[in-house]
Every structure is written in structure tokens, then in C-alpha cells.
Image: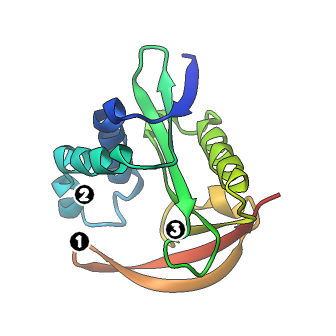
Amino acid sequence: MKNFRFRKANLQDSPGLAYVHVHSWRTTYEGIVSHEYLQSLSIGEREQKWVQILSGSHHTYVCELDDGKIVGFVSFGKERSGEYEGELYAIYLLEEYQGKGIGKELFGIAAAGLKKQGYNSMWIWVLKENPSKHFYYALKPALIKEEMLTIGGESHQEEGLLLELH
């Protein structure tokens, strides 16, 4: 197995982050979100969003291989609605690198980062149909609320989870 390195993302990581973001959506949500919507996702548009995010203050970390290829990332910070403390904004990993402990490591980076920012809890939104949600439920979060979310013109149920950080 190749060696992995975890580090804070920088502006030059925008293309790699966009690639992981789009391809992990396509594999994770295939059969859940419409195929047409998933195919319409643009790496170029996602790259522009990552350039904006990484140009400011951010808490995004990548997992990269020895050759510099980004295979996963995590992004976190202050919870956006103001109701809770910290939030896991995104955690994505290319399908072929799942099940190797990388997701746990990225999640640990987010939890430690939120604790360092003074937060004692982490808010997580996850699609109810997401096949990877067992990853979060293994940590025994509280299911706080459920809301409907529109993706590609279709309604999907989203679960709001609250995890106490220790």
C-alpha cells in the first residue's frame, strides 16, 4: 500500500480537491441522486469554489499520496447556522481509498481542530440514504433533526447529527 500524508490544504490543492469532491459525489450518491445531476457536476466549477475557500481563512486538510495525488479531504469550522458550536462541512474520499483508515484520520483531524478552536461538539449533516453514514453513527451522535434538501430537482432527507467531542 502507498504511504499517505495529511496536511493543511493550500491554493495549489484546488484541482485535486475538486477532483475528489466531484468523483466521490458520483460514487457515493449514484443510485440516490439522479445520474444526470451527478454527471453535470463540473470539476472546473468546483475548482473555482475551492480557490475561493482556500484564498481565505480555512480549516481544510488533505490526504495525499507520496506522489502528491490528493485522495481525500476534510473541511470544518464554526457551525454555519449559529445554533451549535463546530461543524464538519465536508469529508470526502475517493472510493478506491475507502476502508483504509484514511476517513477516520481525516475525521480525527477535524475533531481535534474543532477542540483546538474551543468547540465541544460537532454538527454533521448527512443524507439519510448515504451508504457511508454508518461511519458517523459508529461514533454515537445524537440525531437532532431531519430536513428535506433539494439536489438536482429531487427531494432528499438529510439528518442533522450532533457529536460531543472528548
Residue 105 rendering spot, x and y as whole percentages:
65, 39
Q: Are marks 1 and 2 in contact (CB under 8 Å)?
A: yes
Q: Earlier in the sequence, mark 1 or mark 2?
A: 2
> For residue 2, which quarter of the picture?
top right
Q: Residue at the front extreme?
A: 56
Q: Secondary structure at mark 2?
A: helix
Instruction: Using a 10 Å C-alpha cutoff, classify the residue at mark 2 as few (fewer than 14 neighbours), some (14 to 19) or many (20 or more).
Output: many
Residue type pointed to by label 2: Leu
Q: CA distance from mark 2 to mark 3?
A: 17 Å
- Residue highlighted by disc 1: 152
Residue situated in front as seen by the camera: 24 or 73: 73
Residue situated in front as seen by the camera: 157 or 131: 157
The answer to whether residue 134 is left or right of residue 147 is right
Q: CA distance from mark 1 to mark 2?
A: 8 Å
Residue type pointed to by label 3: Val
Residue 27 rendering spot, x and y as whole percentages:
37, 49
Tell me: residue 141, above or below residue 72.
below
Residue 13 rendering spot, x and y as whole percentages:
35, 33
- Residue highlighted by disc 2: 38
Tell me: residue 42, above or below residue 123.
above
Q: Earlier in the sequence, mark 3 or mark 1?
A: 3
> For residue 122, which quarter of the picture?
bottom right
- Residue highlighted by disc 3: 126
Q: Earlier in the sequence, mark 2 or mark 3?
A: 2
Q: Secondary structure at mark 3?
A: strand
The answer to whether residue 74 is left or right of residue 138 is left
Q: CA distance from mark 3 to mark 1?
A: 17 Å
Q: Are marks 3 and 1 in contact (CB under 8 Å)?
A: no
- Quadrant for the N terminus, please: top right
- Quadrant for the C terminus, please: bottom right
Task: Say which mark, if any, is on residue 6.
Answer: none
